[in-house]
């Protein structure tokens, strides 16, 4: 059901079980915030990301830029070729995090059951709000109106009986969309869609399905569950259920990304302890930067090491205060590295888990000791300033002095990095 701008229209038969799940997705969030704050950018192909000559990538693209084929995660150099008049802006995650807090506060006006997925996206469960605010459709329209009126930003919203369908609905009429999928409309909506619209069907799975003659969601739904299980194992059950609109996941207010890390398999085994420490420091700096970009911090640091004989060991430590600074993560990781047997390694990695959202408050110490995570802490201000330089000019712009000798092309080609 499409909702026209300016109001809610319920036309069509009403299901016995009305939809209660909402998925709210801000349209071109980072770019939209920048255009809101600088009206001269409106109507231009605006992108937020890193510079092309520093191997930067696009973090967000306005819809004007998307008309040229530019999209997020695209190398900036490629985006420049597609759109020579591209307006490229450095990311300001401090500002985006602040705006995200305002958006989340609007959600919480209507329901306490909010599951943030990122700074600009969340699931909401509006069941039980009927007496106060109306049904989920009315709640979604009020949220959309509040965001536009108070923050001058546009959200696309999907309302459906499940998380999968709500997320699908929010994407169907972008930008500035509002789409409702009633229970008796599920087959009509799903059947004509390409099978790649099923959550969990990536390019490889889509190719395998295509080789089996499965091109649409209807094709997948028409196959027997046993056949899909035989071809794809446990994941086959998941995608077959979604093809039938079945998704029993609940909206979880405490949901957060489980972990983030980086590991590298070396072209040749490395036994020099100092070399391993420098590598570990480099990994910790990369992981910390990604955590801050994602608005996360964590309490558990895990070291992973694999020896020449393929024996793999892991060591973990949990700290009292959640961290996302490279030096603090490295301090814990180096301590863990010192605890494993000293021998040449073929793989080294570090992971931060037990994550929490930076928008959530931290319990302070009993005696009010300095909190290193406070925004006004000296080290925090320094880190924010360095992050701004990295986002604008590329990650290699500012690196610890001890890592300078590791930035040669030969070193960057050595082995493979895996961010998780």
Image: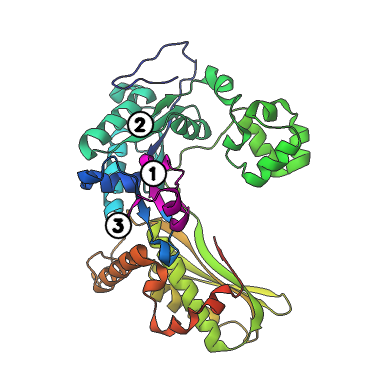
Q: Secondary structure at mark 3?
A: loop
To which residue does mark 1 refer? 65
- Relative image position of residue 226 (x, y in whole percent): 77, 34
Asked if 337 appears above or below 119 in the picture, the reply is below
In the picture, the disc for residue 176 is 2
Q: Quadrant of residue 242?
A: top right
How many numbered marks appear? 3
In the picture, the disc for residue 141 is none
Front residue of 206 and 162: 206
- Relative image position of residue 103 (x, y in whole percent): 29, 42
Residue 62 belongs to magenta span: yes
For image coordinates 63% across by 30% down, the residue present is 243
Dot placed on the residue nearer the N-terminal end, 3 or 1: 1
Q: Which residues are magenta?
A: 59-88
**Quarter of the image with the N terminus in it:** top left
> Which dot, 1 or 2, sits closer to the camera?
1
Q: Secondary structure at mark 1?
A: helix
For image coordinates 46% across by 43% down, the residue present is 69
Front residue of 88 and 34: 88
To which residue does mark 3 refer? 92
Dot placed on the residue nearer the N-terminal end, 1 or 2: 1
Q: Residues within 10 Å of mark 3 (few under 14, many from 20)?
A: some
């Amino acid at each position: 059901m499409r909702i026209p701008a300016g109001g809610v229209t319920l036309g069509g038969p009403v299901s016995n079980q009305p939809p209660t799940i909402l998925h709210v997705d801000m349209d071109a969030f980072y770019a939209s915030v920048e255009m809101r704050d600088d009206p001269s950018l409106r109507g231009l192909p605006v992108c937020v990301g890193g510079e092309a000559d520093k191997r930067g990538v696009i973090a967000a693209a306005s819809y004007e830029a998307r008309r040229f084929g530019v999209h997020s995660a695209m190398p900036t150099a490629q985006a420049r070729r597609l759109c020579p008049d591209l307006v490229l802006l450095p990311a300001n995650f401090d500002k985006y995090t602040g705006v995200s807090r305002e958006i989340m506060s609007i959600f919480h006006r209507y329901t306490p059951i909010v599951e943030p997925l990122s700074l600009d996206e969340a699931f909401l469960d509006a069941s039980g709000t009927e007496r106060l605010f109306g049904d989920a459709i009315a709640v979604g329209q009020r949220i959309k109106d509040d965001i536009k009126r108070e923050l001058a930003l546009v959200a696309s919203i999907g309302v459906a009986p499940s998380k999968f369908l709500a997320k699908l609905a929010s994407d169907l009429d972008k930008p500035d969309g509002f789409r409702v999928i009633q229970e008796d409309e599920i087959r009509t909506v799903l059947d004509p869609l390409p099978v790649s619209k099923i959550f969990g069907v990536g390019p490889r799975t889509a190719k395998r399905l295509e080789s089996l003659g499965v091109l649409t969601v209807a094709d997948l739904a028409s196959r027997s569950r046993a056949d899909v299980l035989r071809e794809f194992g446990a994941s086959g059950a998941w995608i077959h259920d979604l093809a039938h609109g079945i998704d029993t996941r609940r909206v979880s207010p405490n949901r957060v990304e489980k972990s983030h890390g980086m590991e590298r398999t070396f072209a040749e085994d490395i036994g020099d302890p100092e070399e391993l420490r420098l590598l570990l420091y480099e990994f910790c700096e990369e992981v910390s930067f990604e955590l801050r970009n994602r608005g996360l911090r964590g309490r558990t640091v895990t070291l992973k090491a694999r020896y020449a004989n393929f024996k793999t060991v892991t060591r973990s430590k949990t700290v009292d205060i959640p961290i996302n600074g490279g030096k603090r993560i490295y301090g814990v990781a180096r301590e863990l590295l010192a605890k494993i047997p000293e021998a040449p390694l073929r793989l080294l990695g570090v992971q931060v888990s037990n994550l929490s959202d930076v928008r959530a408050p931290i319990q302070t110490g009993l005696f009010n000791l300095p909190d290193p995570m406070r925004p006004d802490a000296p080290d925090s201000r320094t880190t924010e300033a360095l992050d701004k330089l990295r986002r604008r000019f590329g990650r290699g712009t500012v690196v610890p002095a001890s890592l300078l000798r590791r930035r040669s092309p030969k070193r960057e080609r050595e082995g493979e990095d895996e961010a998780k």
